[in-house]
Amino acid sequence: MEELQKKAVWSGARVAKATGGEILYGDVRCRFSGISIDSRRVLPGQLFVAIVGQNHDGHAFIPDALTHGISGMMIQKDRISRTLIQGFKERGLVCIAVSDTTRALGDLAAFHRRKHGAGVVAITGSNGKTTTRRMAAEIISQKYAALSAIGNFNNEIGLPLTLLNLTDLHQWAVVELGMNHPGEIRRLSEICLPDVGVITNIAPAHLEGVGSMEGVIQAKGELLGQIKRGGTAILNADDPNVSRLAIKVKSEVLFFGISKKAAVRAGSIREKGETVRFTLVLPEGKIPVTLRIPGRFMVSNALAAAAVGARLGIAPEAIKIGLENLTSIPGRMNILSLKNGIRIVDDTYNANPGSMKAAIESFSRLKKGARGICVVGDMLELGKESIPLHRQIGESLAMADISRLYVTGAFAESIAEGARKKRMNPQRIRIGSKGSILQDITQYVKSGDWILVKGSRGMAMESLVQGLLDWNDQKS
């Protein structure tokens, strides 16, 4: 995880106050030049926070952190040992103990966020969070000094790292909130205390963690109860799962969408090549916009971001510039050109049923009658709905006018079954590993073909995209 530098100066006493931690050893007046969780990148004078994660325990990397000249350490109480404390004493380091270092990191960020005067825009939703966040940041930057999250810093570790980078120069921060279990968005919202909360859409995703669609709705809706008094909820008028939450909102509500009840909406939508054009309708008037990112579904993300701009008093012309500034986003409908006019649509960042169907529909329009090849991996965290939802994707693929379908993963057969159900020729369906698919596809693809690659984050489908790029390079 990339570290963020130039953080605020903290004292041992302030860290203890913010986290409710106990200073086991060291001078409470000691000052830290920043906070880090990465023993490889921690800088001299910083406080190293030993995070206990699913795959790694930061306490195991304390010896590495010590070689970087840190000034202090935050550890979990259940990891305290005499040897560890003696080592801190010998080096004259501050040692602060907390019950949970991940929660303490969030407490530090919450303390820091409230200390600064910047407003916060928090974005959640089943699809489009990152694109909407990047669009909103571009728009806000036309008028204000804005801080935006890096990559997918949207969980209980990433969000705090973003907020800890707030300075007195920032006027707004734009963050995204992810989740895979109930209560996570509530916690993230408590940390960032949003002035503006955005829900892009609510679709089947993370069902394994929340149990049902009703669980997803409730989990996403946790954001709305944490919006600051006098703040605004920005909701998708086209999504009944989102708009139904409006009755629970105590703050102002601003709707976006195609629906006429939306205050920020789009008209005259048309796709032209790898762009999408539409008329942006704002309370202040209308203005034409050309998105330089393919996919009709991108209009919804643009409207959500435009609604943020409208709420912040940004002029229509500046909103237009912000939207049109954004071009390709790695892993999100990113079109890559190979030799002989072959195009890869890299949509490998993540996948759930909603984003998968949107990608398939957009791909069908993008290829404009050219031969299409789809390479699809599993959609993860769908729980007991995994098999039927993968079958539905197979049905969508069968009706998408593609010449060959490659599927990989534990639910590959379910996708293939759905495709066969809709009378897709079994000879056009190939199931295998990413390695075998890459080998087969390089033999099958020909000049002018379009290739869509998509799957959940855990499937690492970007490795197949890289394989195709490497193959293309070797042909030269």
Image (tube, grey):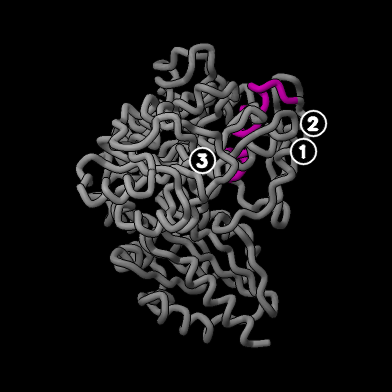
Identify the element where label 3 is drawn: loop
Q: Which residues are magenta?
A: 297-314
Disc 3 crowd rating (10 Å Cα; few below 14, some 14-19, many 20+) is: many
Disc 2 residue type (three-letter): Glu
Determine which residue is flagged by label 3.
34
| Image height of 88 relative to 309, above or below | below
Q: Are discs 3 and 1 less than 8 Å apart at CB?
A: no
| Tags 3 and 2 touching, CB below 8 Å | no
Q: In the rendered view, does 274 fall on the left or right side of 361?
A: right
In whole angstroms, how far apart are the C-alphas of marks 3 and 1? 35 Å
Does the image show residue 403? yes
Residue 70 is situated, as x and y percent measured from the top left of the image, at: 45, 48
Disc 2 is placed on an element classified as helix
Mark 1–mark 2 CB contact (< 8 Å): yes
* Amino acid type, label 3: Gly
**Residue occupying the point 58% across, 28% down:** 256
- The residue that mark 2 highlights is 317
- Residue 33 among magenta residues: no
Question: In front: 324, or 8?
Answer: 8
Residue 14 vs 153, above or below: the answer is above
Q: In the rendered structure, find residue 321 and report the number of the disc placed on it.
A: 1
Residues at marks 1 and 2, CA–CA distance in whole angstroms: 6 Å
Residue 458's tag is: none
Which residue sits at x=61%, y=59%?
334
Q: Residue flagged by tag 1: what amino acid is it?
A: Ile
312 relative position to 432: left or right: right
How far separated are the C-alphas under marks 3 and 2?
A: 38 Å
- Of tags 3 and 2, the one toward the viewer is 3
- Overall secondary structure of the magenta section: helix
